[in-house]
Image (cartoon, rainbow, N blue to C red):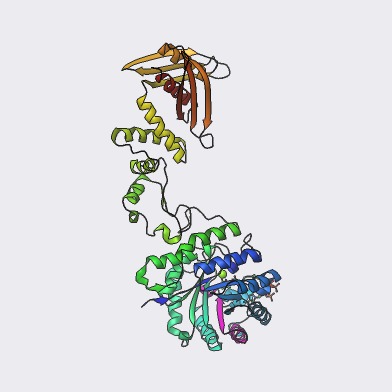
Amino acid sequence: MTEKIYIFDTTLRDAEQVPGCQLNTIEKIEVARQLEKLGVDIIEAGFPVSSPGDFNSVVEISKAVTNPTICALTRAVKKDIEVAAEALKFAQRGRIHTGIGTSDYHIYEKLNSTPEEIIRQAVEAVKYARRFVEDVEFYAEDAGRTAEEYLARVIEAVIQAGATVVNIPDTTGYCLPNEYGAKIAYLKNHVPNIDKAIISTHCHNDLGMATANTIAAIQNGARQVEVTINGLGERAGNTALEEVVMAISCHKNLNFDLGINTRQIIASSQLVSSLMRVPVQPNKAIVGRNAFAHSSGIHQDGVLKSRETYEIIAPEEVGVDQSSIILTARSGRAALKHHLKEIGYTPEGEELDILYQKFLELADKKKDITTRDLEVLAGMEKSRKNRSLKLEALQVVCGSTTLPTATVQVSFGGDIFTETASGNGPVDAAFNAIKSITKRRVHVEEYLVQAITRGSDDLGKVHVQISHKGKMYHGFAANTDIISASVESFLDAISKIS
Ligand SMILES: CC(=O)SCCNC(=O)CCNC(=O)[C@H](O)C(C)(C)COP(=O)(O)OP(=O)(O)OC[C@H]1O[C@@H](n2cnc3c(N)ncnc32)[C@H](O)[C@@H]1OP(=O)(O)O
Ligand SMILES: CC(C)C(=O)C(=O)O
Ligand SMILES: [Mg+2]
């Protein structure tokens, strides 16, 4: 039998309180609708007493989404609770999330209070919230640094007062997974009425342990997880929804039922990232752009043979079209062959080896190798193979105080020919050297250099048109070195003269 874990999304409350992440009501409704599609159980929509805008957002979200419970946050303050209740009046199912700090830091330093007074205030707040809604969640702020015996007393008292969910936040992201798990287990074993409420986790990521702590908590009895899309939230953020959901989904032996439509994960991540203007780091688990990208030869070969060798999640499961094989200087032949096949080119043996060497030379010079680059490499190799004149070596000397000179070495029918010539620039000098080698009276009619995509590290594509005895011949080549590309292109055109 699987057990239900409730997904409580607080992107619109904890993430939205991050500087720069503030959303207007229309944007919040868009996020709330996406969260509904994703299948979350509870949407924490805001802190209504904090501003008229936040109040209005909770009202409008309550009208706009119907499936999830809509939750509003408050302090253990009557006014906050009244305003939250008012904001929730259109919700099909409304929840008030009230609470107060329980650690010594919070009791003595922030609230200037005493442990007994905090319990009294907590109980009063829960009872007051129950006057407005049936579903009242209590948070013991900074529970992560609260002594267990005292925390157990607080939790027992608020359940007695009517709390339906008890939230044990690691507000400062301080706990280690075994400590946090043990805290939940302690409450499970020492709070006599704990079975009358759902235990909730709310972890922050200050030490990068929010997801691990959340999983430890559910393994010890928590049944609600408070999470945000992309892990956004105060300071280093909250537990990322996508991480917890996929960790549970990958580990079927945990036997938990989530009811999340995982295929909506990427769409949710992209929406939140763009509306909150926080780019997702490339290596972010599940939703980073590299989460399903393979760039080193051994991994690429493995994934191409069987995806599971290097992937624990099928990309479609989270809404990513497919894994990507990125061509870099660390790629091997398997990856190159895979990409060449996609553009209809299937070299084998020596042909593949030559192309692979050319590819590596380019990849060492250029970070991103695009399909267009491959088309050029493959096309060039084809025409180079068929060419009678092959460039063996090229050296140019040029500059503002030098006469441009080129030495070109060309092979033809098994013989090697070398010539040096000058010209009005390095390309003209090299073309003159080739003209002397071939003894052809050719005239350059057109000479065109173009970058293939962008950037000074790009492949330069050269097109040369020559005339010989009244006929036109075209040559084409590409290289990151445009002088070499020009010479190859010229040889390509001359080779076509019969
Ligand atoms: C861990 C969390 O994420 S908690 C949620 C954090 N989110 C927010 O704070 C955003 C919304 N907050 C706000 O808009 C404002 O802070 C308000 C409207 C709540 C309060 O504003 P102000 O009345 O100006 O108070 P201010 O923000 O300066 O200080 C907070 C007060 O609440 C008290 N307080 C803090 N938490 C609680 C609590 N859970 N229950 C009761 N009182 C609390 C503080 O001790 C302080 O009281 P004091 O002024 O008597 O010292
Ligand atoms: C308000 C509470 C739940 C909170 O955000 C925290 O403790 O981090
Ligand atoms: Mg928080």
Residue at x-position 58% and y-position 19%: 400
Q: Which residues are magenta?
A: 118-146
Q: Is residue 169 left or right of residue 318?
A: right
Q: Quadrant of the N terminus?
A: bottom left
Q: Quadrant of the C terminus?
A: top left
User: Which x, y percent locates residue 316?
Assistant: 42, 58
Which residue is at a point 52% across and 14% down the rendered structure image?
423
Q: Is 121 contained in the magenta span?
A: yes
Can I make out residue 369 in this image?
A: no
> Where 468 falls versus 18 (above or below)?
above
Which residue is located at x 48 percent, y 33 percent?
459
Write down the quadrant of residue 132 in the picture.
bottom right
- Toward the front, the furthest residue is 470
Q: At which x and y percent is residue 39? A: 49, 70
Residue 86: which quarter of the image?
A: bottom right
Above-or-below relation of 18 to 437: below
